[in-house]
Amino acid sequence: MIGLGDIAEKAYLPVLAAQPGLDLHLCTRNSKILDRLGDTYRIADRSTSVDDVIKSGVEAAFVHAATGAHRELVEPLLDAGVHVYVDKPIADNLADCEALVRLAKAEKRSLMVGFNRRYAPGYTGLLALPRHLVLMAKNREKNPDVPRRAIFDDFIHVVDTLRFLAPGEVTGSRIRTRVRDGLIEHIVLELSGDGFTAIGLMNRVSGATEETCEVMGDGVKRRVVNLGDVIDYVGGETLTRRPDWVPVARQRGIERICLEFLAAVRDGRTISADDALISHAICEDIVANAT
């Protein structure tokens, strides 16, 4: 695991440390964090550079460093024949994303992108329902940001989830953005195809930080709130809450996506980033609209 920031520590490390048969290796330039987490999880293998990780002979790597460092970390790993799981996005621009996807193909190695919502139970449950209309909102409270960072680091989850839930081929798209003083305040994305429309939005000057996703069609409506609460509206309103003892990593799909990557490595299967690249290309289009 390379990069031991907040998400890596809270979500990914507890999942990986609990897996049998893993020889886990930690890597970060921050020696204090490295020793604290290594001691906490009793992990002896520790490094402060990706070169040392490669020399140790790892088979696979989870990269959770800051987005700006992704290419400089992922590229040498793939060159060395290491399978890579990289937290979204692959990189903060389409050209670097394409270069890394090409390299993974050339090296015949997995490059899996951390789109955990594709594995979140609340969202995977929507696949069984009519989805003539898909609506997703991911809002931030008083947090306008530069367009590229807001779109590639945050709104990309909305883009990819809409594509995941779209019931058919996406043949049309429309983008609207509001930018003030160089900072993006809101984004609206519409993807459409034969018989369906998927709309995603983000308001970064909202009154709340929240995420909702709902699907409708053929007299059916279901809404998922913050990846946990599920509300069905057929014949009334029924709320199903996440059971108290379900870990957050399982609720948010992180456990399942980690297990899928590890299973692929063990089974000799290669996970392609081709589909994930489409979501990054849409993000690049949104950046162009906002600048």
Image: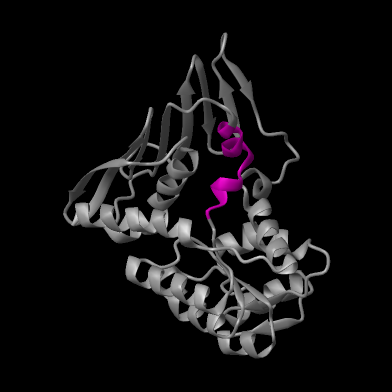
Residue at x-position 57% and y-position 60%? 7
Residue at x-position 47% and y-position 21%? 217
Is 53 in front, or is 279?
279
- Location of residue 267 in the rendering, given as x and y in whole percent from the top left corner: 74, 65
* 136 is within the stretch colored magenta: no
Q: Quadrant of residue 9?
A: bottom right
- Location of residue 160 in the rendering, given as x and y in whole percent from the top left corner: 44, 48
Above or below 137: residue 144: below
Q: Quadrant of residue 5?
A: bottom right
Is 55 in front, or is 138?
55
- Magenta stretch: dominant secondary structure: helix
Above or below 80: residue 133: above
- Location of residue 131 in the rendering, given as x and y in whole percent from the top left corner: 47, 28
Residue at x-position 20% and y-position 49%? 179
Q: Is residue 148 left or right of residue 10?
A: left
| Magenta segment boundaries in residue numbering | 115-127
